[in-house]
Image (cartoon, rainbow, N blue to C red):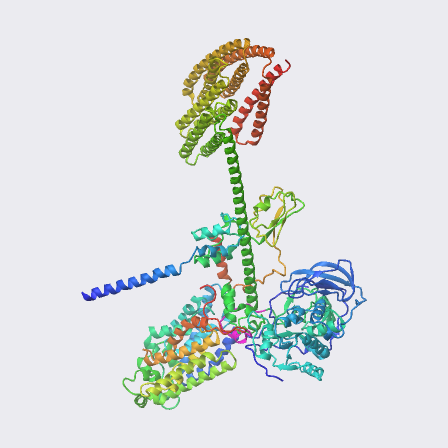
């Protein structure tokens, strides 16, 4: 017998082992249902290979290991798979976990199986694989898959195999009884493991409170060829802790965070060793184990050989439980076992003991008192920690410090809590701290991972953007190059204006307009809500306006100096003019709104309005000029005048409407304005008259067989007339809001305007008729007319679409107006076209 | 079936704080008896008075702090504090001196810091030090051992003692029953050598036996506590050793001016401190190594204060000073845990 | 007079010497970058959810380094606030409810038969945890999901649910031991009350 060392601390709780060793091991009657948790071991849960409803035979594989550290499951008896799903399992959390439930058919029929025969002739890998196939995992406590431990010989030098038969926890006698009754099987297992690991010697560590087991082992060892040493250690809890037993037997310490193999030692539990023996010799997978059923609440404490998956209830029945005395049901020993909440929880590979305790036996812990730092915990700690320091840290959630004080070297043996005079649940504090630290670390890992992914994504987006930019640049360069080539080719020909410039100018103008719009909107919003820096906003609007104007002017200039593309110019100018009008309208509206609310810089707005008007006029003029330029040489200056006059008339009309609105707002002052309106309207009427005359003149001119520009002229005239109509409509609408004298006056003015308009219209129509006749006679440019009509229709659809999209009310109103105008235009064009077409 | 769910372990040693305190109280019995035999009824009266006051005060403070009174009173820690204070102060100290001491010990030194388990200083020693500084006259009027009062067992009668503590007596009365302690004698011996002092002083030559006996009684109690594993040997032995070694060194160097180790160990509060005061777990270092350092520090400080300090006995100050150092000692005296090459040092985590 | 001059000279000499030492140290031990931002970023939960009002965890870390409040991160909760308080040596404050409340950890779940394959959630996911292509059903890689719920809002058919992570045996945590009733509970209760008041 070799030297026995000592480990620090330890306690001597009442053993309570005698009760359950009086009778030999008995089998449990076959239970009706067996519940086999997929996770009974350390590592990955196994994965089922059977389906619900499938018939299985005893020993058949029902779940296979899914990774290196995992163990398979076998049917403990023959029967039917009833379900695969959550069922309570023996775990401290009391949660459910996936289990395979087998309903036994009572026949207990084995699947065909056989041992390996002479295993010494097999490759070690083959032998280990067989052990793995038999689902063997450590049966002492943790449930570490045994095959992994047997592989250790590959990368570690194993010189000592320790059979941990100390079984230091009170109550438990499963290993004791196993050694008493099946010592030869244990020895057989030791032979197999020795064959695999080739240790220089084997030590069986047994506590001195198991004399019969020691005798049985000694008897079995007689004549054994192996260097096996039974070493009896003094009874002290927790000498059966793997690390403590190693220290006891060898004087060596397993390094913190390491495994025994790091110092050349492998530990195995006698139960596991026997299971290895049965697996190798008979081909039996691990489907049953010895369970101590004890405690004050059972009449016959004893050791039972139970199938894995047997519900605790069946075991308790076999030991004749007193239901009324049962207070606490513990799986494992009283020091480290877990309580289970009900008796349908099944036996698993690591269930060595079930204690059915009465309330007197295991009373609820007294309330926690303050720690008086008495240091008793430190005296008993087998890991030589400072339990009460760890307690303070865990309680104060200073997990960093707890970790620094080697919290993770705590084996949760419970010795500290056992001796604590203040009844502090120390172990639970450590478990709490450990799981908090683990969670924190897991979260840290997860967040680091998330950061890495986030950064990778950001980098990718950045890269994609850069690539896009690159491509865009490349395209632009390509375009510029081809442009240059074309230019150089054309350079001898017509001196073309750089179209690029114009398009750039256009873009600039558009941007300026958008900005203006936005600024205007912001200003409106600010006015509406009554807060915000209105003057600043107004200034911004002003600035935007100016820049828009400049851009527009620049565009116009650029376009104006382009003599060749006159047609396109006209179109563009038209658009510009329309835009200018829209702007003008908006400015007016803003001014109105400002007047309504009575706040804001009215004068500034008015100035803005004027500027907008001016720009609208300019645009219109420019358009007209361009148009007349397009018709250069063919039409007389009369036409131009007519157009100008029409434009002016329209402006005046607008002003009149403006004034009407003002009158609406400002009582007396409004009357003056109204008078002004009347005058303006009169003027307007005159202008319209003139236009009529001009039109007549030009209509007269068209009678002569001249040329095409005339229809263009007429068209413009028609447009003017239709626009006038629209204006009148609007004026009418505005009038509806007016009351009293102002109203009657305005009505009068409007009436007059209407008459004038009707006259103009009539004149136009007769002119048109005349022109049509002429055209019919000469075959007018139908093509041009058609194109115009199509364009007008497209404009209508576009406007409709944008109207559907727009939400802001003011925007809607202006869009509606535009739409109406566009519709008129399209209609007119259509009529014209129709009139021409039949001819 | 409804069963309870609990964290392991599921069994506990029949042990409680109250039990620990009861055993401590039991271990003080020899000392109390010795004090009564040699110095009269004063000690018993002081213990009764201090104990009563301490328990009442503890209950009142617990009520104020809204803590369950019965639960905390049962731990008996207040009684232990009161007892240690009562045996430390002179038996004839007036009731209000004891009262102030108990209030300081329970209210300030214990509960202001959060109650049992939270106090950084030994409550009894805080109270003692405060009393010694505040009421030097009362606190140095130690009763004389009966051997000096005449033949036979001459101690002040129970009623006289009661009167001395709770009422008032003639100053002359004190003269007949009080006297200097050996430590006083040696401290205030003027320019005399040890031998001369010994020859001149009756306290030293005749009365010293009483102090030896009391010390022996405390030692007995201490051995009992060690036997019952209520305390560990580390702090007491290291303190006594440190004191003995220091005094032996100086005694060996100059026997005329320095008292010998035996004198130091067997007079004053040395033994009381070694087994009952520095073993107070709350305010001492926690690990075994830490306790050795803690005890040694106290031993050295006691010697320094006794030899060169202003006060004849320095136990209270030594203990308080080392209480102050205890957390620091803890940080640097962690044990080497299983599986580690060396012990951790210093603060873990972020400071 | 000489003494005064000597003293001044000595002091001057010392000043020069220490100046040189400090200057050297500042060059020799220069800390590159702003590690405090990295440290703060390391403590944040990296959900990139933007509940703090910043476009991701790192911008918030930078904001904290520049003095922003540390209590704007609901996914991190009180533990993150405590850790930040610890790191920055400021007082730990309760979570600012304005930015949301601390919730159980969630993962996104796409009801796949309702998914129309618009890829909007894929674009919204800050950690690329959603798999799928246009007109193809999408699915969440649960392990990669940070539970930021940024994908929920863009979904045009509302087929994304945030479901709390289920407690299983694998992720179950030991609870802190229950305080014995009435023992230290008053202190604890007071603390909670203060927190409530702070809210």
Question: Relative to A783, is B305 above or below?
Answer: below
Look at the image and tell me in which quarter the N terminus of chain B lies.
Answer: bottom right
Query: Which residue: 33% across, 86% down?
Result: B253
Specify the quadrant of the image occupied by residue B7. bottom right
Question: What residue span does the magenta drawing correspond to?
Answer: A365-383
Q: Position of residue A529 (x, y in %)?
A: 46, 34
Residue A167 is covered by the magenta coloring? no
Residue B316 position, x and y percent, is: 38, 76
In percent of width and height, residue A325 lies at 68, 70
The image shows a total of numbered marks equal to 0
Q: Is residue B108 visible?
A: yes
Whether A655 is drawn above or below A260: the answer is above
* Residue A738 shows in the view: no
Q: Is A370 a magenta residue?
A: yes
Percent coordinates x, y for residue C60 in the rendering: 48, 51
In the picture, which quadrant includes the C terminus of chain B?
A: bottom left
| Closest to the observer, A709 or B316 | A709
Query: In the orientation shown, which residue stands out farthest toward the right?
Result: A107
Q: Nearer the viewer, residue A383 or A613?
A: A613
């Amino acid at each position: 017998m070799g030297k026995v060392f000592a480990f620090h601390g330890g306690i001597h709780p009442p053993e309570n082992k005698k009760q359950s060793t009086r009778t030999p091991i008995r089998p449990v009657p076959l239970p009706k249902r067996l519940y086999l948790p997929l996770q009974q071991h350390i590592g990955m849960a196994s994965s089922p290979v059977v389906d619900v409803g499938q018939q299985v035979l005893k020993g058949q594989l029902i779940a296979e290991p899914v990774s290196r550290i995992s163990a398979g499951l076998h049917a403990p008896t023959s029967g039917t798979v009833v379900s695969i799903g959550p069922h309570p399992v023996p775990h401290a959390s009391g949660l459910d976990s996936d289990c395979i439930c087998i309903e036994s058919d009572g026949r207990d029929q084995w699947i065909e199986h056989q041992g390996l025969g002479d295993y010494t002739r097999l490759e070690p890998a083959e032998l280990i694989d067989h052990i793995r196939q038999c689902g063997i995992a450590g049966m002492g406590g943790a449930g570490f898959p045994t095959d992994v431990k047997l592989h250790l010989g590959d990368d570690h030098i194993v010189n000592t195999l320790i059979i941990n038969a100390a079984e230091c926890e009170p109550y438990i006698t499963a290993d004791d009884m196993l050694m008493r009754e099946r010592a030869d099987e244990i020895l057989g297992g030791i032979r197999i493991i020795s064959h695999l690991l080739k240790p220089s010697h084997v030590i069986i560590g047994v506590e001195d409170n198991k004399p019969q087991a020691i005798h049985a082992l000694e008897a079995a060892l007689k004549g054994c060829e192996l260097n096996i040493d039974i070493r009896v250690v003094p009874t002290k809890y927790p000498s059966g802790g793997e690390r403590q037993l190693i220290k006891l037997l060898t004087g060596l310490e397993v390094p913190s965070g390491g495994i025994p193999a790091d110092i050349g030692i492998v530990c195995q539990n006698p139960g596991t060793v026997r299971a290895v023996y049965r697996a190798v010799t008979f081909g039996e997978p691990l489907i049953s184990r010895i369970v101590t059923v004890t405690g004050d609440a059972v009449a016959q404490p004893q050791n039972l050989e139970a199938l894995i998956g047997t519900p605790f209830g069946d075991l308790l029945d076999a030991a004749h439980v007193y239901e009324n005395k049962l207070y606490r049901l513990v799986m494992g020993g009283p020091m480290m076992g877990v309580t289970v909440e009900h008796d349908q929880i099944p036996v698993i590979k690591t269930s060595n003991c079930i204690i059915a305790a009465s309330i007197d036996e295991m009373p609820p812990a007294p309330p926690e008192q303050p720690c008086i730092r008495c240091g008793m915990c430190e005296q008993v700690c087998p890991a030589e920690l400072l339990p009460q320091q760890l307690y303070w840290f865990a309680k104060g959630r200073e997990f960093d410090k707890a970790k620094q004080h080697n919290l993770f070297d705590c084996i949760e043996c419970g010795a500290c809590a056992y001796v604590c005079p203040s009844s502090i649940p120390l172990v639970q504090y450590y478990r709490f701290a450990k799981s908090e630290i683990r969670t924190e670390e897991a979260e840290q890992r997860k967040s680091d991972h998330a950061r890495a992914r986030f950064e990778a994504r950001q980098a990718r987006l950045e890269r994609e953007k850069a690539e896009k930019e690159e491509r865009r640049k490349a395209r632009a360069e390509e375009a510029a190059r081809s442009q240059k080539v074309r230019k150089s080719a054309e350079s001898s020909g017509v001196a073309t204006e750089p179209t690029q410039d114009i398009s750039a100018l256009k873009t600039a103008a558009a941007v300026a307009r958008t900005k203006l719009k936005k600024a205007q909107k912001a200003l409106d919003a600010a006015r509406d809500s009554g807060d915000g820096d209105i003057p600043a906003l107004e200034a911004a609007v002003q600035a935007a306006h100016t820049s828009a104007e400049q851009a527009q002017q620049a565009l116009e200039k650029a376009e104006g100096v382009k003599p060749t593309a006159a047609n396109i110019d006209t179109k563009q100018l038209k658009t510009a003019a329309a835009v200018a009008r829209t702007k003008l309208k908006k400015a007016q509206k803003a001014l109105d709104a400002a007047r309504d609310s009575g706040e804001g810089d009215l004068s500034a707005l008015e100035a803005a309005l004027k500027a907008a008007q001016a720009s609208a006029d300019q645009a219109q003029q420019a358009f007209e000029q361009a148009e007349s330029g397009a018709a250069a040489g063919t039409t007389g200056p009369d036409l131009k005048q007519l157009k100008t006059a029409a434009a002016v008339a329209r402006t005046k009309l607008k002003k009149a409407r403006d004034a009407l609105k003002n009158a609406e707002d400002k009582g007396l002052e409004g009357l003056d304005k109204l008078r002004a309106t009347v005058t303006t309207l009169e003027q307007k009427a005159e202008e319209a008259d003139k236009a009529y005359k001009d039109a007549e003149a030009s209509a007269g001119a068209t009678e002569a067989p001249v040329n095409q520009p005339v229809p263009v002229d007429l068209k413009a005239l028609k447009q003017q007339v239709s626009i006038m109509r629209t204006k009148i409509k609007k004026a009418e609408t505005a009038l509806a809001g007016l009351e009293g004298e102002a109203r009657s006056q305005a009505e009068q003015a409007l009436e007059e305007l209407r008459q004038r308009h009707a006259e103009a219209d009539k004149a136009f129509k007769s002119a048109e008729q005349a022109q049509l006749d002429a055209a019919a006679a000469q075959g007018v440019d139908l093509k041009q007319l058609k194109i115009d009509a199509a364009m007008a229709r497209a404009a209508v659809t576009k406007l409709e679409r944008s109207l559907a999209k727009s939400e802001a009310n003011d925007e809607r109103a202006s869009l509606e107006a535009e739409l109406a105008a566009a519709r008129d235009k399209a209609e007119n064009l259509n009529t014209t076209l129709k009139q021409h077409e039949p001819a | 079936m409804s069963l309870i769910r609990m964290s392991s372990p599921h069994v506990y040693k029949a042990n409680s704080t109250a039990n620990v305190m009861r055993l401590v109280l039991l271990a003080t019995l020899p000392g109390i008896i010795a004090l009564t035999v040699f110095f009269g009824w004063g000690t018993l009266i002081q213990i009764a008075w201090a104990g009563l006051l301490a328990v009442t005060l503890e209950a009142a403070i617990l009520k104020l702090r809204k803590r369950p009174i019965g639960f905390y009173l049962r731990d008996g820690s207040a009684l232990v504090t009161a007892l240690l204070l009562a045996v430390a102060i002179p038996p004839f100290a007036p009731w209000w001196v004891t009262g102030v001491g108990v209030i300081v010990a329970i209210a300030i030194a214990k509960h202001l810091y959060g109650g049992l388990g939270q106090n950084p200083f030994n409550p009894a020693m805080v109270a003692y030090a405060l009393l010694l500084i505040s009421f030097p006259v009362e606190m140095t009027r130690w009763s004389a051992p009966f051997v000096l009062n005449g033949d036979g067992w001459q101690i002040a009668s129970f009623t006289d003692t009661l009167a001395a503590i709770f009422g008032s007596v003639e100053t002359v009365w004190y003269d007949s029953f009080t006297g200097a302690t050996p430590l006083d004698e040696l401290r205030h011996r003027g320019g005399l050598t040890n031998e001369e002092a010994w020859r001149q002083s009756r306290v030293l030559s005749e009365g010293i036996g009483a102090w030896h006996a009391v010390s022996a009684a405390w030692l007995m109690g201490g051995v009992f506590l060690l036997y019952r594993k209520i305390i560990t040997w580390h702090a007491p032995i290291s303190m006594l050793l440190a004191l003995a070694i220091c005094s032996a060194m100086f005694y060996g160097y100059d026997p005329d001016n320095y008292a010998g180790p035996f004198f130091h160990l067997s007079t004053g509060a040395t033994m009381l401190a070694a087994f009952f005061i520095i073993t107070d777990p709350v305010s001492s270092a926690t690990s075994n190594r830490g306790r050795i350092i803690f005890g040694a520090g106290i031993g050295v400080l006691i010697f320094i204060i006794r030899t060169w300090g202003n006060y004849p006995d320095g136990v209270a100050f030594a203990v308080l000073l080392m209480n102050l150092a205890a957390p620091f000692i803890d940080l640097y005296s962690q044990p080497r845990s299983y599986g580690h090459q060396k012990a951790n040092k210093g603060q873990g985590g972020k400071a | 007079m000489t003494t005064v001059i000597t003293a001044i000279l000595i002091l001057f000499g010392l000043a020069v010497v220490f100046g040189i030492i400090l200057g050297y140290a500042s060059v020799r031990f220069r800390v590159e970058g702003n590690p405090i931002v990295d440290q703060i970023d390391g403590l944040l939960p990296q959900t990139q959810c933007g509940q703090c009002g910043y476009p991701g965890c790192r911008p918030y870390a930078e904001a904290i380094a520049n003095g922003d409040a540390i209590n704007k991160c609901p996914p991190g909760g009180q533990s993150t606030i405590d850790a930040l308080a610890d790191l920055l040596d400021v007082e730990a404050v309760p979570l600012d409810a304005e930015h949301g409340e601390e919730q159980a950890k969630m993962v996104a779940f796409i009801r796949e038969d309702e998914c129309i394959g618009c890829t909007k959630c894929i674009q919204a996911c800050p950690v690329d945890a959603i798999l799928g292509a246009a007109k193809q059903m999408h699915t969440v890689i649960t392990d990669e999901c940070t539970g930021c719920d940024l994908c929920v809002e863009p979904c045009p058919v509302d087929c994304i649910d945030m479901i709390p992570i289920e407690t299983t045996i694998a992720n179950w945590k030991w609870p802190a031991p229950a305080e014995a009733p009435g023992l230290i509970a008053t202190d604890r209760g007071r603390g909670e009350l203060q927190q409530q008041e702070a809210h």
